[in-house]
């Protein structure tokens, strides 16, 4: 059979299935075998068994679970590719681990199907890859290229006079057809494929360099700071600490002027590893912020083990602040808790002046949100800085970095 020929209605494809859960394996085999176009010629419960089954049966398609007891799918796929370049591979997984999909694709998998999907999606994937056709739902098509990424900065201000104290760096996708797309439109896929590592590294480099320029032009006391977000995959990435340290050194930024925002859900996956990771972050000299505090799991028990410098109150609390039986008392409790721990408290999602008055009444004095500014370009941030510090902003000095920034 030619792999490049299109399938006909009477074409039958030889398939090997590998899954370490015996009941799931039996269910997959039973459902696939019900399709007359699929002939199950082998099964396996481990990667080694799967490799041997492919060697013995020479199937058209291998369906392999990402997580196996003796190896992950990419390792098995690489071994299979050493002796059989023709077999098409479908990776089957429920894994949410960042980089799982991308690592399978790099190893030689033709496509990726989630276990939570209906069986017809797996059948469609098998039939498509058997003849060398790309699967149209490939999520890599939903990712930007690096040159389509842009950084927007949201000012963080003092609530009593709206003077800027820092910025949060956020990444957007300048889509060639759809225009500027928000982070939520592509970051979930970036996390799943592992592309998030490149994205976050690039954002850090851009944001730290920009902060240094602003600090030089606007020498405030205390200095302006920059916060950057951290995905859960960074906890397991052995290269992350070195990457962050290089970005700090290369940009010349003061480590204490960098705030790394951590979602509290990171502490749920592997609390001990997360605590060790955050301790290493703190050792680099950066400040740590716990974002979306109170929105899901509030790890108060970890506050005595991790030296957080900042709490960010989730926008869902701000939205209901003034409602009857709203969140005012909870926000006040968070404010007092942060004060007792010596932490700065930043309120997210501030939209109107009545919220500002209410927040100030319970001792909160730092916030961000549409009331002050949405995430905006670096050039527009400079306009706001000039308004906040009319007597402190210095004219930019000619330099290669300024020329590069102005022509981007």
Image: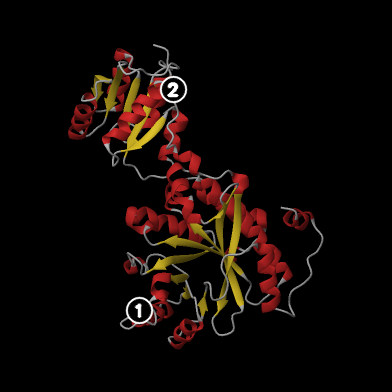
Whether residue 180 is situated above or below residue 388 in the rendered picture:
above
Farthest right residue in view: 398
Q: Secondary structure at mark 2?
A: loop
The residue to which callout 1 is attached is 327
Quarter of the image where the N terminus is located: top left
Seen from the viewer's position, the closer of residues 323 and 349 is 323
Colouring method of the image = secondary structure
Label ID, residue 307: none
Residue placed at 36% from the left, 58% from the top? Answer: 267
Q: Is residue 61 visible?
A: yes
| Percent position of residue 223, x then y | 64, 72
Is 231 on the left or on the right of 272, as rendered? right
**Quadrant housing residue 116:** top left
Number of marks in picture: 2
Query: Which residue: 63% across, 46% down?
Result: 147
**Res 68 visible:** no
Relative to 386, does residue 401 appear above or below in the rendering? above
**Percent from the top left, x then y, of residue 355?**
46, 82
Which of 278 and 132 lies nearest the eye of the viewer? 132
Tell me: 79 left or right of 157.
left
Decide: few, some or many residues near mark 2? Use Cα within 10 Å; few <14, some 14-19, many ≥20: some
Q: Nearer the viewer, residue 66 or 117?
A: 117
x and y, in percent, of residue 303 in the image: 37, 68
Q: Are marks 1 and 2 in contact (CB under 8 Å)?
A: no
User: Relative to residue 112, is residue 17 drawn left or right?
Assistant: left
Give the residue at mark 2: 132
Q: Residue at x 60, y 57 (%)?
A: 151
User: What is the spatial separation of the Cα atoms under label 1 and label 2, in whole angstroms?
Assistant: 56 Å
Res 4 → quadrant: top left
């Amino acid at each position: 059979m030619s792999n490049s020929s299109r399938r006909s209605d009477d074409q039958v494809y030889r398939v090997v299935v590998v899954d370490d859960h015996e009941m799931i394996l039996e269910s997959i085999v039973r459902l696939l075998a019900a399709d007359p176009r699929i002939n199950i010629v082998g099964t396996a419960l481990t990667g080694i068994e799967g490799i041997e089954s492919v060697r013995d049966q020479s199937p058209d398609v291998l369906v392999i679970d990402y997580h196996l007891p003796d190896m992950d799918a990419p390792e098995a796929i690489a071994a299979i590719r050493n002796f059989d370049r023709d077999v098409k591979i479908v990776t089957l997984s429920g894994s949410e681990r960042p980089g799982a999909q991308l690592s399978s694709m790099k190893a030689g998998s033709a496509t990726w199907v989630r276990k939570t999907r209906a069986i017809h999606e797996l059948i469609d994937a098998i039939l498509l890859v058997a003849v060398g056709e790309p699967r149209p739902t490939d999520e890599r098509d939903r990712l930007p290229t690096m040159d389509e990424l842009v950084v927007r900065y949201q000012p963080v201000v003092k609530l009593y006079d709206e003077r800027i104290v820092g910025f949060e760096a956020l990444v957007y996708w300048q889509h060639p057809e759809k225009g500027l797309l928000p982070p939520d439109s592509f970051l979930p896929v970036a996390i799943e494929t592992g592309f998030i590592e490149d994205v976050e590294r690039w954002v850090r480099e851009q944001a730290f360099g920009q902060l240094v320029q602003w600090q030089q032009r606007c020498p405030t006391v205390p200095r302006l700071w920059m916060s950057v977000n951290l995905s859960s995959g960074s906890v397991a990435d052995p290269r992350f600490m070195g990457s962050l340290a290089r970005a700090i050194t290369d940009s010349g930024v003061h480590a204490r002027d960098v705030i790394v925002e951590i979602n509290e859900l990171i502490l749920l996956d592997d609390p001990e590893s997360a605590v060790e990771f955050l301790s290493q972050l703190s050792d680099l000299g950066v400040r740590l912020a716990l974002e979306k505090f109170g929105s899901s799991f509030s790890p108060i028990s970890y506050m005595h083990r991790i030296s957080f410098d900042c709490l960010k109150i989730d926008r869902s609390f701000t939205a209901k602040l003034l409602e009857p039986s709203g969140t005012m008392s909870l926000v006040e409790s968070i404010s007092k808790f942060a004060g007792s721990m010596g932490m700065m408290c930043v309120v997210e999602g501030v939209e109107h002046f009545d919220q500002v008055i209410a927040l100030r009444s319970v001792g909160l004095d730092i916030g961000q949100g549409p009331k002050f500014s949405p995430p905006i370009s670096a050039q527009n941030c400079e306009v706001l800085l000039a308004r906040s510090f009319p007597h402190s902003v210095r004219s930019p000095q000619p330099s290669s970095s300024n020329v590069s920034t102005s022509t981007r």
